[in-house]
């Protein structure tokens, strides 16, 4: 049995930045440091940070006065920032810069008087945060059918943005439907699907013709991980979303000649290597990395944490 590893896979620059923000805040302020919602959608990452002194809460009313609180990589509504200011909390923003770009587009178009549409999945933290950037005239659509049912005040003055972790193909269908129904609708200047989501999907597309089974490492509530699994299935590959090697069933491997492995943007490489070791124990005797593109994106840390950065020795 052969193992084919997708590259790129796993952590993106936004996730790397968010995790580093929590670790640096713990170093600067000492534990406990509070984090509103999971910093990223991965149980292993959350438990590792919890062991270091991070406390994960759902809402700000669970955060005591006088301690730092970090907002997750998914972004938050403006009302959350307002609440933090009212309580004089030391709020640190770990929102992915690409999500912030969407927030800025929303704010700009709202100030210009546009009625806004967000393409995304209801109840996802990023969607909740983006919808919370403006008080009104914001519609959420998750499918072509949603577009067909949409009622707007002024069809000639509409603008749309997208959740960053959607499937490119899924987003294209909805965008096409919006353009058909509202020919004058204005889209973002640049594609809002983040580079990491696009690259990981491209890797799955490239490997799908070469594998009999696809294993996607990621959390059940990770949007981009679910999209990778769905993309594999759409291309005719039997695919499973797993959180670790413990989720793999040996009967999945029956008759399989090549197993493809990828990981969502919030899944650590440690979990990928555990899956590789498991498959080797099951008889895999060949390992190949399928490289689609090399990623070298880095995002700057918040200014207040830069003082704690320790220069890493060159490798």
Image (tube, rainbow, N blue to C red):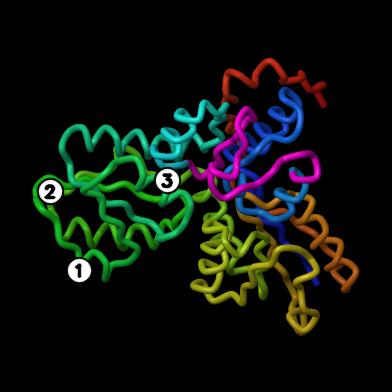
Residue identifier under label 2: 184
Q: In the depicted view, which residue is nearer to us: 290 or 133?
A: 133
Q: Residues within 10 Å of mark 3 (few under 14, many from 20)?
A: many
**Quadrant position of the C terminus in the picture:** top right
Q: Which mark is residue 149?
A: 1
**Splitting the image into 4 quarters, where does residue 296 fall?**
top right
Residue 235 screen position, x and y as percent: 51, 72
SS under mark 3: helix
SS under mark 2: loop
70 is within the stretch colored magenta: yes
Q: Which mark is residue 129?
A: 3
Residue 6 screen position, x and y as percent: 66, 55
Give the extent of the magenta segment. 50-75
State the CA–CA distance, disc 3 to disc 2: 26 Å
Q: In the depicted view, which residue is nearer to us: 58 or 210?
A: 58
Q: Residue furthest top?
A: 307
């Amino acid at each position: 049995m052969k193992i084919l590893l997708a590259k790129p896979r796993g952590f993106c620059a936004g996730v790397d930045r968010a995790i580093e923000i929590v670790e640096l805040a713990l170093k600067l302020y000492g534990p406990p440091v509070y984090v509103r919602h999971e910093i990223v959608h991965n149980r292993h990452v959350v438990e590792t940070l919890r062991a270091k002194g991070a406390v994960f809460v759902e809402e700000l009313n669970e955060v005591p006065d006088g301690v730092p609180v970090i907002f997750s990589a998914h972004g938050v509504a403006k009302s959350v920032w307002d609440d933090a200011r009212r309580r004089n909390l030391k709020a640190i923003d770990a929102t992915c810069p690409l999500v912030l770009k969407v927030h800025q587009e929303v704010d700009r178009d709202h100030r210009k008087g546009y009625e806004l549409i967000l393409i995304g999945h209801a109840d996802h933290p990023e969607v909740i945060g983006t919808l919370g950037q403006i008080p009104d005239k914001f519609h959420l659509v998750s499918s072509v059918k949603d577009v067909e049912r949409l009622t707007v005040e002024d069809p000639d003055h509409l603008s749309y943005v997208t959740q960053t972790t959607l499937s490119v193909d899924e987003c294209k269908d909805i965008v096409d439907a919006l353009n058909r129904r509202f020919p004058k609708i204005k889209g973002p200047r640049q594609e809002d699907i983040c580079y990491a989501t696009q690259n990981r999907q491209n890797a799955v597309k490239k490997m799908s013709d070469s594998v009999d089974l696809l294993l996607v490492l990621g959390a059940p509530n990770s949007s981009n991980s679910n999209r990778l699994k769905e993309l594999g299935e759409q291309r005719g590959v039997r695919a499973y979303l797993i959180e670790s090697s413990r989720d793999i069933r040996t009967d999945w491997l029956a008759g399989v000649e090549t197993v493809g492995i990828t990981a969502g943007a919030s899944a650590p490489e440690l979990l990928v290597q555990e899956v590789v070791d498991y498959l080797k124990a099951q008889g895999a005797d060949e390992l190949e990395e399928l490289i689609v593109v090399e990623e070298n994106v880095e995002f700057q840390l918040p200014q207040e944490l830069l003082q704690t950065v320790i220069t890493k020795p060159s490798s």
